[in-house]
Image (spheres, helix red, strand yellow):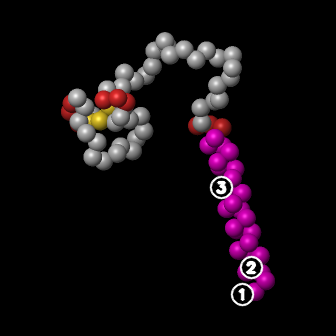
Amino acid sequence: MRLNDLAKGSSVLLGVIVAGYVSTIYVDQRLAPPPKTASEPTSTSAPTDSPAPANGGSPCIGEGGSWKNWPWPNVPMGSPKCP
């Protein structure tokens, strides 16, 4: 291995590390929910997007094969049917 090859490889590795760090900062700023401040009310009386959790809030399969209580796109396999 020549010194030139080592320099190229090191610069590529450094570039990948910097790009990964910058992308995590970007994702944290754009996708993470903002932290709650002390001045914001914490009441739960506001309407929510999802209905009240059935089956104690655990994910389950509803009528027609739809998933309940699971907000993420990846769904756990083998969840029980909703009561």
What amino acid type should be assigned to the residue bearing mark 1? Answer: Met
What amino acid type should be assigned to the residue bearing mark 3? Answer: Gly
Say which residue appears at 49% left-offset and 12% top-offset.
Answer: 45
Within-10-Å neighbours for mark 2: few <14, some 14–19, many 20+? few
Within-10-Å neighbours for mark 1: few <14, some 14–19, many 20+? few
- Of the pair 39 and 48, the residue shown nearer to us: 39
Q: Report the disc number at residue 6.
A: 2
Occupied quadrant, residue 2: bottom right
Q: x%, y% of residue 51?
A: 36, 21
Q: x%, y% of residue 34?
A: 63, 30
Q: Tell me, yes or no, whether the highlighted magenta stretch contains residue 76.
A: no
What amino acid type should be assigned to the residue bearing mark 2? Answer: Leu
Q: CA distance from mark 1 to mark 2?
A: 7 Å
**Side of 60 where 26 appears, left or right:** right
First reached walking from the N terminus: tag 1 or tag 3: 1
- Circles 1 and 2 in contact, beta carbons < 8 Å: yes
Against 17, residue 69 (above or below) is above
**Residue that carries the numbered disc 1 in the rendered image:** 1
**Residue that carries the numbered disc 3 in the rendered image:** 20
Q: CA distance from mark 1 to mark 3?
A: 27 Å
Say which residue appears at 74% left-offset and 79% top-offset.
Answer: 6
Looking at the rendered structure, the secondary structure element under dot 3 is helix
Q: Which residues are magenta?
A: 1-28
Q: Tell me, yes or no, whether the highlighted magenta stretch contains residue 16.
A: yes
Q: CA distance from mark 3 to mark 2?
A: 21 Å
